[in-house]
Image: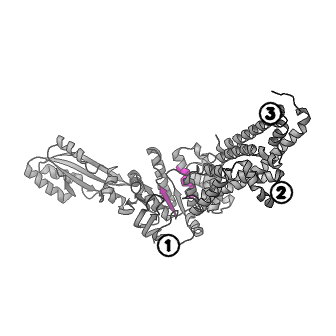
């Protein structure tokens, strides 16, 4: 194994890449998380027996999500590049990668949200209806709070998946630790640099997982 | 005017994929007067849970009329129905408390929906928690409570907006007998002290016996029998009612029990139906003694229903055949008598 390394000269790039990863992932988690929440809620409430039960709407949403979700992210970036040019004005770089990530994350997160919402006992929704609560109020004050613990864990999982996807940013000129590891580690045969990026990603993931666990435990009180 | 009035109500659930349509309610008439406690009994699938959900419009009717407080609710829109629901409390078999909220937060929920001010909320919640005896549990979460305590929170939550009607859907079916009695006692107080009308759905006759002024028996989406609780329990007419009554009252020996009794006791078996103070047992026994007919009480007992008593006693009569014949005829003049055929 080759342990000659340029790492001492690259520290400023390491920190910049770390910052870029955090920046890309944070914005994606926020925007994609919000979109995914809305999409997941829509999937849930349009189910049979749901608050806004509608077979047509549910089928449409399911087809939409199932269409986009299995596309490998590296292909997804290329596929939505024209759309990125229209929406964020550019098809390459961090903005384009954030756009593609947000979309992909939204579809993935929508399923996580839907899965967690179906664990809410239908009885508590009925109880809220029985006191005259409106459907929108029930979504905001009963459905989401009752599923909050698992939702936090689901979003923690989504964070890791987004970090994973963001590593491919380099293909459209985006930055971050993944791109750094490929460019300065893998392609330079610099194993130390590759593993430095890997370790930073591992530490980031560990920290966020810890935060997610603590928050979820607080919400679930166990 | 009745508080709740159902006229020829039907409810059909449309067929789901691979299934057939389900006629849950097939033409039900129901009147609930203000202040009374009405029990609706039936086996699972008889339609009682659906019926009670038509009253607060959690389910929509397929046809027929539902009036609450004189107002036809089948034609109301969702927004108007929410107002109606504010005036009807509901409690559930599985309590359906919000796990993410404390006891206080659970009781606060209907008040928040109703737009009650924070200060008024606090007063009301405090009163309610004292009423149900859980003032010390205000900051506990549902998973820290016992089943009985959870149902008391459910009752407090249902009463928060001062409804005139409380719907209880199998509200004690998940509780042990002791806790059941505790919750029933609370419901009696809700009725007596707060004057709240209660419709209780149950498959437990004990609940009907100790709580309901009036009882309706449902089978296959229809009301097959109804009347004052004492009447229905002491003289059930329909087979399904007899089966229900039989779960709490030793009305008449079942065939296999009867065979066993005959093997032990000689003579003819007659079942005597005592109702309240109509007939005194002493008169009956004196008559038998006078005719020198030996008798033995082989089955039955005296039952109490909310202060009234009745009993179905099965006697084995033994002695001179002619004397027993005369005695059976004489008893029939004193008390409803039924000979149990061999």
User: What's the CA distance linking mark 3 and mark 2?
Assistant: 32 Å
- Tag 3 and tag 1, C-beta contact below 8 Å: no
Q: Nearer the viewer, mark 1 or mark 2?
A: 2
Q: Nearer the viewer, residue A218 or A105?
A: A105
Q: Position of residue A51 (x, y in %)?
A: 58, 60
Q: Which residue is mark 2?
A: A90
Q: Position of residue B182 (x, y in %)?
A: 48, 48
User: What's the CA distance linking mark 1 and mark 2?
Assistant: 64 Å
Which of the 4 image quarters holds residue A1? Answer: top right
Q: Nearer the viewer, residue A82 or B43?
A: A82
What stretch of residues is rendered in magenta?
A: B151-172
Q: Which residue is mark 3?
A: A195
Q: Nearer the viewer, mark 3 or mark 1?
A: 3
Q: Which residue is mark 1?
A: B70
> Which chain is home to disc 2?
A
Label 2 crowd bin: few (<14), some (14–19), many (20+), radius 10 Å: some
């Amino acid at each position: 194994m080759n342990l000659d390394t340029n790492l001492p000269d690259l520290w400023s790039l390491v920190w910049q890449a770390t910052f870029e990863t955090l920046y890309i992932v944070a914005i994606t988690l926020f925007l994609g998380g919000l979109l995914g929440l809305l999409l997941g809620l829509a999937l849930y409430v349009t189910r049979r027996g749901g608050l806004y039960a509608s077979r047509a709407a549910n089928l449409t949403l399911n087809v939409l999500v199932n269409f986009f979700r299995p596309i490998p992210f590296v292909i997804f970036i290329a596929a939505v590049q024209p759309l990125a040019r229209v929406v964020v004005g550019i098809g390459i770089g961090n903005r384009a990668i954030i756009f593609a990530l947000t979309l992909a994350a939204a579809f993935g997160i929508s399923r996580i949200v839907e899965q967690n919402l179906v664990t809410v006992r239908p009885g508590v929704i009925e109880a809220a209806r029985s006191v005259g609560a409106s459907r929108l109020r029930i979504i905001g004050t009963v459905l989401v709070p009752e599923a909050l613990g698992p939702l936090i864990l689901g979003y923690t999982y989504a964070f890791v998946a987004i970090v994973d996807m963001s590593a491919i940013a380099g293909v459209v000129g985006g930055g971050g630790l993944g791109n750094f590891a490929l460019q300065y580690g893998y392609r330079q045969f610099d194993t130390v640099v590759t593993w430095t990026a890997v370790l930073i990603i591992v530490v980031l993931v560990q920290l966020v997982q810890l935060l997610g666990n603590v928050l979820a435990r607080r919400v679930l009180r166990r | 005017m009745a508080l709740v009035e159902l006229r020829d109500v039907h409810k059909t659930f449309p067929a789901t994929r691979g299934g057939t349509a389900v006629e849950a309610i097939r033409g039900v008439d129901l009147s609930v007067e203000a202040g009374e406690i009405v029990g609706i009994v039936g086996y699972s699938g008889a339609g009682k849970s659906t019926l009670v959900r038509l009253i607060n419009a959690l389910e929509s009717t397929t046809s027929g009329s539902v009036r609450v407080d004189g107002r036809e609710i089948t034609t109301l829109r969702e927004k108007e129905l929410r107002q109606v629901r504010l005036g009807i409390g509901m409690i559930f078999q599985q309590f359906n408390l919000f796990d993410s909220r404390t006891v206080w937060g659970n009781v606060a929920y209907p008040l928040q929906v109703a737009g009650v001010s924070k200060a008024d909320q606090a007063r009301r919640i405090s009163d309610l928690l004292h009423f149900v005896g859980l003032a010390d549990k205000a900051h506990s979460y549902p998973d820290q409570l016992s089943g009985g305590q959870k149902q008391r929170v459910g009752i407090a939550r249902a009463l928060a907006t001062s409804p005139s009607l409380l719907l209880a859907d199998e509200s004690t079916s998940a509780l042990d007998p002791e806790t059941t009695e505790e919750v029933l006692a609370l419901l009696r107080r809700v009725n007596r002290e707060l004057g709240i009308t209660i419709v209780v759905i149950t498959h437990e006759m004990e609940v009907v016996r100790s709580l309901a002024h009036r009882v309706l028996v449902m089978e296959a989406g229809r009301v097959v029998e109804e009347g004052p609780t004492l009447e229905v329990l002491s003289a059930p007419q329909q087979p399904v009612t007899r089966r229900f009554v039989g779960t709490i009252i030793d009305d008449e020996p079942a065939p296999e029990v009867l065979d066993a009794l005959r093997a032990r006791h000689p003579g003819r078996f007659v079942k005597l139906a005592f109702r309240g103070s109509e007939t005194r047992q002493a008169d009956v026994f004196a008559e038998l003694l006078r005719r020198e007919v030996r008798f033995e009480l082989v089955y039955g007992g005296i039952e109490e229903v909310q202060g009234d008593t009745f009993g179905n006693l099965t006697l084995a009569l033994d002695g001179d055949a002619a004397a027993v014949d005369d005695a059976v005829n004489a008893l029939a003049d004193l008390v409803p008598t039924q000979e149990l055929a061999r």
